[in-house]
Amino acid sequence: MTDNHPVTRRAVLGTLGALGVAAAGGGFVAGAPGKAHAQALGQNESVQDAMKRLFGDKPIKDGAAIIKLDLPLIAENGAVVPISVSVDSPMTATSYVKHIYVVADKNRIPIVTRVTLAPEAGRAFMGANIRLGETGDVRAIVEQSDGTLLQVKREVKVTVGGCGG
Amino acid sequence: MSDIGKVRLRIPSSIRPGDVVQVRSLVIHPMERIERDAQGKIVQKNYNYINKVIVTYLGKTVATFDTTQSVAENPFFSFTFKATDPGQLKVQFLDTTGGRYEGTVEIKFS
């Protein structure tokens, strides 16, 4: 027992040190791309420009068969509008939903969020509270792992806009 | 405002192995909107809003949200993950001023 003791302590200290270094490094790496993405994603632009920037000229098919977009018909307060998107799609390592985009056509910053999913998510689902500036279409665009783009959109009537400025 | 960065996570009360579990997360954050001056021009400054949400389960990233200012104040996000083993689920929120807020919850089977 006494022989084992110092070895154990050394092992423990070594592991702790390695963890500390990993945590510090991880923080730096995770922080940097966060900023870069925000600049690329959230811009003051028209929805046509935003769609072109994100998807180029790739065709976007109608996804009404598999995408379920859950939104209120009338949003009394545009500052908080609950939205959820679920996609009826397998989530396996070979075929899964890679991204879910939420785009609000009339917002000054049309791209609301881009969700990146891993097959471990089990189900292609996302929910969030978003802002809507005025009455207009809200679209959910799904990108599958093979690059197929599917879209559904619905109009939401907004009584009081929530984007300010 | 001292509440900025408070994270709340909600999971179902009973989880069985293999379940696809829906988690709801909320963070207290102002999510500053674009401001305009008297001439209607956009004020250029570094707006403080959350631009990334990272969900990890057992050390693996399950979902990432890249968000913009079109997301509501005190943002709420929900997502799912497949509960395979007991362990830690962590949600990290990163904002444009370098703020980093995180919430963790232990996934246990009952």
Image (cartoon, helix red, strand yellow):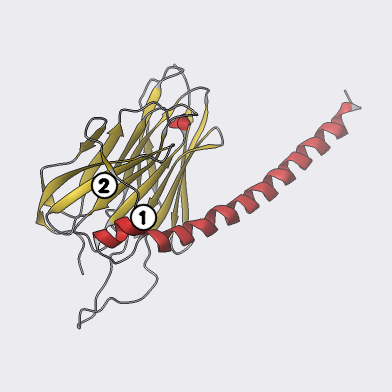
Identify the amino acid type marked 2. Asn
Q: Residue at x 86, y 33 (%)?
A: A7
Q: Position of residue B35 (x, y in %)?
A: 26, 72
Q: Residue at x 43, y 52 (%)?
A: B52
Chain on which label 2 sits = A
Q: Residue furthest bottom?
A: B39
Residue A141: which quarter of the image? top left
Asked whether the viewer can see residue B86, the reply is: yes
Chain on which label 1 sits = A
Q: CA distance from mark 2 to mark 1?
A: 27 Å
In this picture, is A59 found above or below B96?
above
Q: Which mark is residue A56?
A: 1
In this picture, is A5 found above or below B50?
above
Badge 1, how many Cα within 10 Å: few under 14, some, many 20+?
Answer: few
Q: Nearer the viewer, residue A89 or B70?
A: A89
Identify the amino acid type marked 1. Gly
Q: Secondary structure at mark 1?
A: loop
Asked whether the viewer can see residue B30, the reply is: no
Image quadrant where one finds the C terminus of chain A: bottom left
Q: Secondary structure at mark 2?
A: strand
Q: Nearer the viewer, residue A59 or A142?
A: A59
Image quadrant where one finds the N terminus of chain A: top right
In this picture, is B26 found above or below A44?
above
Q: Earlier in the sequence, mark 2 or mark 1?
A: 1
Residue B58: which quarter of the image? top right
Q: Position of residue B44 (x, y in %)?
A: 35, 76
Q: Nearer the viewer, mark 2 or mark 1?
A: 1
Q: Which mark is residue A64?
A: none
Name the residue beneath numbered marker 2.
Answer: A129
Badge 2, how many Cα within 10 Å: few under 14, some, many 20+?
Answer: many
